[in-house]
Amino acid sequence: MKIAVIGQSLFGQEVYKELRKDGHTIVGVFTIPDKDGKADPLATEAEKDGVAVFKFPRWRVKGQAIPEVVAQYEATGAELNVLPFCSQFIPMEVIDWPKQGSIIYHPSLLPRHRGASAINWTLIHGDKKGGFTVFWADDGLDTGPILLQRECDVEPNDTVNTIYKRFLYPEGVKGTVDAVRLIAEGKAPRITQPKEGATYECIQKKDNAKIDWNQSAEALHNWIRGNDKVPGAWAEVDGQKVTFYGSTMDNGTAANGQPLEIPGASRPGIVTKAGLVLFGNDGKTLLVKNLQFEDGKMIAAAQYFSSGSSAAVELTEEERTFAEQMRAVWQSILSNVSHIEDSTDFFKSGAASMDVVRLVEEVKLRAGSCQLQNEDVYMNCTFQDFIQKCVRKLRGEDDEEELVVDYVEKSANNLTIKMPHQLFINGEFVDAEGGKTYKTINPTDGTAICDVSLAQISDVDKAVAAAKEAFEEGEWGRMNPRDRGRLIYKLADLMEEYQEELATIEAIDSGAVYTLALKTHVGMSIQTFRYFAGWCDKIQGSTIPINQARPNRNLTFTKKEPIGVCAIVIPWNYPLMMLAWKTAACLAAGNVVVLKPAQVTPLTALKFAELAARAGLPKGVVNILPGSGALVGQRLSDHPDVRKLGFTGSTEIGKHIMKSCAVSNVKKVSLELGGKSPLIIFDDCDMDKAVRMGMSSVFFNKGENCIAAGRLFVEETIHDQFVKRVVEEIKKMKIGDPLDRSTDHGPQNHKAHLDKLVEYCQTGIKEGATLVCGGKQVQRPGFFFEPTLFTDVQDHMYIAIEESFGPVMIISKFKSGEVDDVLRRANATEYGLASGVFTRDISKALYVSEKLNAGTVFVNTYNKTDVAAPFGGFKQSGFGKDLGQDALNEYLKTKAVTIEY
């Protein structure tokens, strides 16, 4: 069809482009005149394509169409008018002229919310459903027949911006183009708008956006978000007009802070660490994140009394001299600016990252005691704010807010260990909703270590919101990658400083033998953060040669970008190390984290949260939520603002998480699941090494090891000798207190797991496997299980198929020379996490490693993981990688950019 596009904005531009892709002829684009010498995006796009563009300042005068304007329009020969977004009044002579008529996009479900501020009123009225209508144009009252409607859920904390970006813009473009298709096919309906439910509201402007405080908290929240960002809901505070942004319904923010009198409000507001708490006339609360003053300055609401416009410090004579020196520095850097005003913006004036480094160094030269950081410049980018920041630092008034930790202290391992036990959300340790707690148990003796806060769904929502804000609005998202790497490296240094305490906590909370905890649980965690700290400034895309569309040229390049809010759910066997494997890569990629540790082992994760805060990671970047998988894990899987979930755990739960992530918002998922890793030992092996490493492959970390050798295949010629040697080694193992340096074998992690191990071994005995040793609980306090050995295990047996996740060695023999047969048996499992082979024959080793269907193959060794080597499984052992460069890709998205020149 021949179409006239009448409108403006990026929305109009996208509709125009899609209509051209559909093969329609755009005979004219009618848009607004240039503003400050800059054309509207719709006009720019059309002019590039050589389409006629008309920029009429108006279409009518005193209610009458301007004949010359109408004549120019009619000359285009349009068969249909499409008005994607139009701020001008179009006369009916134009609306009715095409043979197909005119259609218009409206961002509400008509007949509800007619008028120009439809999105605002959808939110102000607290509608649960929103959407858009494409209707046949009328005389401007939005009463024409409906052609097409599409709806969406309105989320409790949606703003005009979020609902527009999430649905009204992308789906509105598609819907408008679909409406044109229906017209072209002769299938477009004309449905008379019902009278029931019809509303028409005024245009929202600043003068009518004043807040009426005599309302419920929900109504106040709806009014503020319905006017966010334009025109902005406002009220008088301290004699000046203050605009409120970033409202959320408050579910129990601790109202500890400084009261703020607000004329007309039922109660004074409270400036807290989380923001400004406001009260409705029903006693309920809402939380506002940001405030803007009449001079345009915007601050975090939490900083009202410290950084508001009234809080500017008065400079001394010496400080004024320093300020003028710095004004001269700014002038030398911003040579394109004629004069540095207090309002001059460093970055809007053209400064780059190198200029930030120079500015920080210039400050040090003139005031050595002012330890300015790069991020201080980014957060205080006008000259006035920059000077205020410097002066506060010089006066010692800008110290970091002290981290408040309610420790549980215990004496253990010749140390006084200090353990946080509350949730960690937005840089603070806080109680769970309702003060709910549970007891975490020491598996060595079965006694309670302490009460730990038990996260609820509302706590998950708070943590995700804090993470989202840190990613989208906070300094983490703006931080130079190298600075981000320095913070992560500083965190690793702190972990090393506290490594004995971390290892002790790990031992008493998970049962890990202290020496192993120190070397592996904690030691490898430190290595992991250091390794990924080095990757921060090495994440890069590539340039790609593409076919040239002559006469123009094209450049295509890719960018690796962080995903955003990432959820991480980890198991109980390596509490700190599993945290490190996922979190280090996630943070290095520039993401933010909400992590759920295993409910039975939360303590090192909470200690890690403390160290992350002390290392200087901004608030909201790391959030730790101890709690149940059914509640916390499920909510993270379902949450619409979580864009990636990394999980280590059972295959059964992994499948459930994958389904939830798909149904909710198609989250990116990586899964490291169960395993039944085969270890093949040939008769030409180094027997001493095979026995030593075979023992380690099963009994390392008391068998609570995802890559443990779940089944050993031993060549028949050495089978009996190998079994005899293993029994001798098992007898030497010392079972006992994990804090005792001579202990080889500590307690299982928790009672339920111990009971499953007993049941597992009983099943093996019933099926006819030979129990050589072990197979039962140790008769002592705690959750100890004997190192166990089964032989004569047949392929059909339960213990040959399912993993024990405990200290149980399963041995089957295979006939000499039958390499392919033992490979078939080794691969006859739904798991594929790890595998191993012992042989002196390099050809055989390479052949077997090629044929084994597992993510990791160990040759003449076992359990040798390294931070630089990718780790992950095949089949029902999951997908995705931890560690190595591959792990970064799990937390990055690739964007392709093509430029024509």
Image (spheres, rainbow, N blue to C red):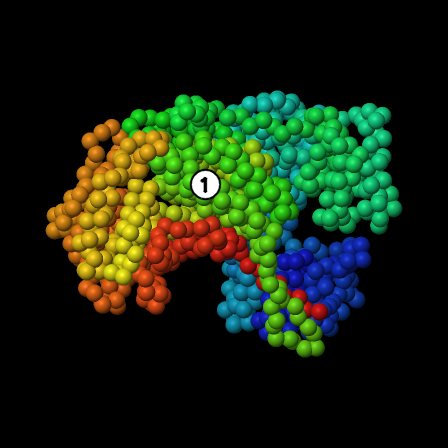
What amino acid is labelled 1 in the image?
Gly
Which quadrant of the figure has residue 570? top left
521 relative to 111 in the view: left or right: left
Q: Is residue 746 something one can see in this rendering?
A: yes
Residue 14 % position (x, y): 62, 62
Image coordinates of residue 787 in percent, x first then y, are: 23, 41
Q: Within 10 angstroms of label 1, few (less than 14), some, or many (20 or more) residues?
A: some
Residue in the image at 82% along x and 41% along y: 329
Residue in the picture at 45% in, 41% down: 523
Q: Which image quadrant for residue 636?
A: top left
Residue sitting farthest toward the right: 338
Which is more toward the observer, 828 or 416?
416
Q: Nearer the viewer, residue 552 or 220?
A: 552
Q: Quadrant of the N terminus?
A: bottom right
Q: Which residue is mark 1?
A: 523
Tell me if 330 is positioned left or right of 731 in this view.
right
Front one among 573 and 159: 573
